[in-house]
Amino acid sequence: EADLIVAVYPPACRALGQLRASGQLQTPVWGYLTDPAPNFLWVHPALDEHLTVGEHTALEVTARYAVPAEAAGPLVGPQFRTVERTSAREEVRTSLGVAREDTLALLLLGSLGIGGVHRAARSLAKAGIHPVVLCARNAKLQRRLSKLPGVTALGWRTDVDRLICASDVVVHNAGGLCLTEALVVGVPAVTFAAIPGHGKANARSLDESGTAPWARNRTELVRQVARLGRERHVPWSVGRETAVRRICAELQTRPELTVDLTEVHTA
């Protein structure tokens, strides 16, 4: 009985597209691509709309798969849009014992804390950059990193938005969502040790579009983090139009529904 289905998971996009093509599903289906680089699991010609985070992804969808796509902006938790950056930066740095003038690199590597974490943290610390690593529930990684001088290793956190605010640069492994959250907050990002498959495809897309440089070794990682830490330039502008607004605007065109867009202005 849904009025609109929005699929945000690749196999779901493909499966729902097949159901639309066969006529078994009458409800409109939109696919929302959370990754910077599309693959065939994200798209299906029978989907009613394909939405992407950025313009470069929308262009790549059309060029590669010959289906129209629209850049609808980021889909992240509202806390990443509403966090007060200045106070969060001061409070978090004080609690972590990081000086105001230090370059802080936040390593966001997913809920499992995987990738080239140890070598990245060690290389950054040796270069005089303070790495703060989110180890999630990987207690073994947290214990190992805590032994490295100049490295702060944290477990599972629910204040990632504030941690990003306290950072000068985010280092990610191109899983997709951490990067979007960082750019919405307004912190530049560097890709390092991209995970196989879609991670490397994302890293390539982000690098080619100028959204986030791909550091392919530790020397390049240190250089890019130091550069972005000085410049603090975010090469991606987050406009007011978001995926939530785009979806609500579609529902608002239907006379039988009442959608108040003022309730989702921070989504």
Image (tube, rainbow, N blue to C red):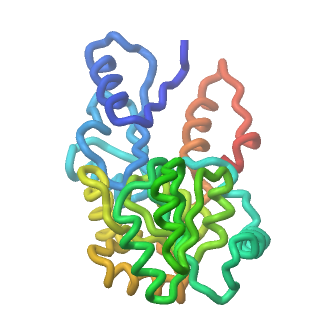
Q: Is residue 148 left or right of 213 when viewed as pictured?
A: right
Determine the residue positioned at 32% across, 65% down: 193
Residue 168 image position (x, y, % from top left): 57, 77
Question: Is residue 241 in view from this perspective?
Answer: yes
Quadrant assignment for the N terminus: top right
Q: Identify which residue, 14 or 152, lies in the foreground.
A: 152
Asked if one can make out residue 53 in the rendered structure from this viewpoint, the answer is no
Q: Is residue 230 above or below residue 123?
A: below
Q: In this view of the protein, which residue sits in the foreground, 183 or 135?
A: 135
Frontmost residue, 58 versus 225: 225
- For this view, does 265 lie left or right of residue 126? right
- Residue 195 picture location, percent across and down: 30, 56
Observer-nearest of 252 and 135 = 135
Q: Residue at coordinates 45% horizontally, 88% vertically from top-left?
A: 127
Relative height, residue 16 to residue 168 (above, below): above
Q: Which residue is drawn at 38% across and 14% down?
A: 25
x, y percent for residue 130: 55, 80
